[in-house]
Image: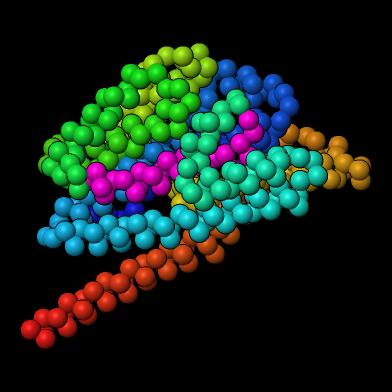
């Protein structure tokens, strides 16, 4: 099986992060009443981008990790593969995550005349929860109870980190029964009403992504390829249709139904399934897709930077008001343009100078550990 990047998955990453960025406009960038955003929110919401991220993560991670673990011939080799996986994930995610946690905390100290970043105490507790990878539990505890802090999006990152920690252990415990264990996990959640705690440990989309990855290694996966989507107009129509269904399910009219989150997880998994074949089924190649795949490659950085970027734009508007410049900065289109520009710049800087270098350092550390293990093994064989 090939483990190269799947461009159609990058497309879905772009859709996911753009949906989340749009969802957070109301409340983070525009704190007051925005009739257009409120009108759109009544008909469709885009927070389901987080669940799409979960399904993508489950698929991408399991696609490479599970075959590697199942190919191990000894318990020691299994733990070495697990160690390498954890190192890769840590170097890929934690440096950027921790950097923006600290920057948000510093902003709450030094760039917070307007109070947009919240109180220092709330941000300090949020930073600690983010460092400890328990932000999702704090987020559930704070729901409509107390101020969380400006790093509230870290709840989903903590859930994914917990998933990365547990998946190799689940594969070891259940072995060949892993599929049944994951199916049971999904079934238990599909029709369960999600209270705040269950909303922040919703692992059905993650589990469905893992199941899809396991299926992609079997012969039947190829036979189920949706080749009818080869028609250039049909794939985008399916994408838009599923996206519209997800957006309607995410509205408040379904907030008290038991099946809503499970249905969202299933529809997100369907999108990942179509994208997994990497045949341009969801969108034809062209300039728009090239742009979206670029966004997808920076999606992690955009997810980290968009809230501080939104709040910084508001803080700048507050500070410029005494200079008589606030009318120029009060137009929603100009505010949005400033925020989008700042998100793009910060994301690109983070991607180039944090993500890529730290990813390479993680790969280098793994190579050194593997070389050391080989040298020790060879030395032992020679001495015998």
Q: Residue at x 64, y 49 (%)?
A: 104
Question: In the rendered view of the protein, which quadrant contains the C terminus?
Answer: bottom left
Decide if residue 50 is on the left or right side of residue 220: right
Q: In the rendered view, would you say 369 is above or below 355?
A: below
Q: Is residue 3 visible?
A: yes
Pick the front one: 69 or 263:
69
Q: In the rendered view, would you say 331 is above or below 342?
A: above
Q: In the rendered view, would you say 148 is above or below 344?
A: above
| Residue 35 spot, x, y in % from top left | 69, 21
The stretch in magenta equals 146-171
Decide if residue 276 is on the left or right side of residue 299: left
Q: Give the quadrant of residue 27.
A: top right
| Residue 279 spot, x, y in % from top left | 29, 43
Q: Residue at x 32, y 74 (%)?
A: 368
Q: In the rendered view, would you say 259 is above or below 147?
A: above
Q: Residue at x 37, y 71 (%)?
A: 364
- For the stretch drawn in magenta, the main secondary structure is helix
Pick the front one: 209 or 38:
209
| Residue 275 spot, x, y in % from top left | 32, 40
| Residue 129 spot, x, y in % from top left | 53, 45
């Amino acid at each position: 099986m090939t483990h190269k990047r799947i461009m159609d998955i990058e497309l879905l990453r772009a859709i996911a992060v753009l949906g989340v960025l749009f969802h957070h406009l109301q409340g983070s960038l525009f704190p007051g009443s925005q009739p257009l955003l409120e009108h759109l929110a009544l008909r469709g919401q885009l927070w389901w981008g987080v669940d799409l991220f979960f399904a993508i993560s489950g698929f991408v991670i399991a696609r490479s990790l599970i075959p590697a673990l199942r190919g191990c011939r000894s318990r020691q080799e299994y733990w070495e593969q697990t160690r390498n996986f954890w190192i890769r994930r840590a170097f890929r995610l934690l440096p950027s995550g921790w950097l923006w946690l600290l920057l948000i905390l510093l902003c709450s100290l030094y760039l917070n005349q307007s109070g947009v970043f919240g109180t220092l105490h709330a941000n300090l507790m949020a930073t600690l929860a983010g460092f400890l990878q328990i932000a999702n539990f704090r987020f559930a505890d704070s729901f409509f109870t107390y101020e969380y802090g400006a790093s509230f999006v870290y709840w989903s990152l903590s859930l994914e980190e917990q998933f990365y920690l547990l998946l190799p252990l689940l594969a070891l415990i259940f072995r060949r029964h892993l599929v049944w264990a994951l199916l049971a996990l999904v079934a238990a959640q599909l029709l369960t009403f999600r209270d705040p705690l269950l909303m922040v440990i919703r692992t059905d989309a993650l589990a469905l992504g893992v199941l899809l990855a396991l299926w992609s290694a079997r012969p039947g996966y190829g036979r189920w390829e949706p080749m009818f989507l080869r028609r250039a107009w049909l794939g985008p129509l399916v994408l838009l249709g599923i996206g519209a269904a997800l957006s309607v399910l995410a509205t408040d009219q379904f907030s008290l139904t038991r099946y809503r989150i499970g249905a969202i997880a299933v529809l997100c998994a369907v999108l990942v399934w179509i994208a997994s074949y990497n045949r341009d089924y969801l969108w034809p190649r062209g300039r728009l897709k090239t742009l979206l795949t670029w966004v997808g490659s920076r999606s992690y950085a955009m997810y980290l930077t968009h809230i501080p970027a939104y709040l910084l734009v508001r803080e700048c508007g507050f500070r410029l008001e005494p200079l008589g410049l606030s009318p120029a900065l009060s137009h929603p289109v100009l505010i949005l343009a400033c925020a989008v520009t700042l998100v793009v710049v910060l994301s690109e800087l983070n991607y180039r100078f944090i993500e890529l270098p730290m990813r390479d350092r993680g790969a280098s550390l793994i190579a050194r550990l593997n070389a050391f293990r080989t040298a020790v093994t060879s030395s032992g064989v020679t001495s015998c």
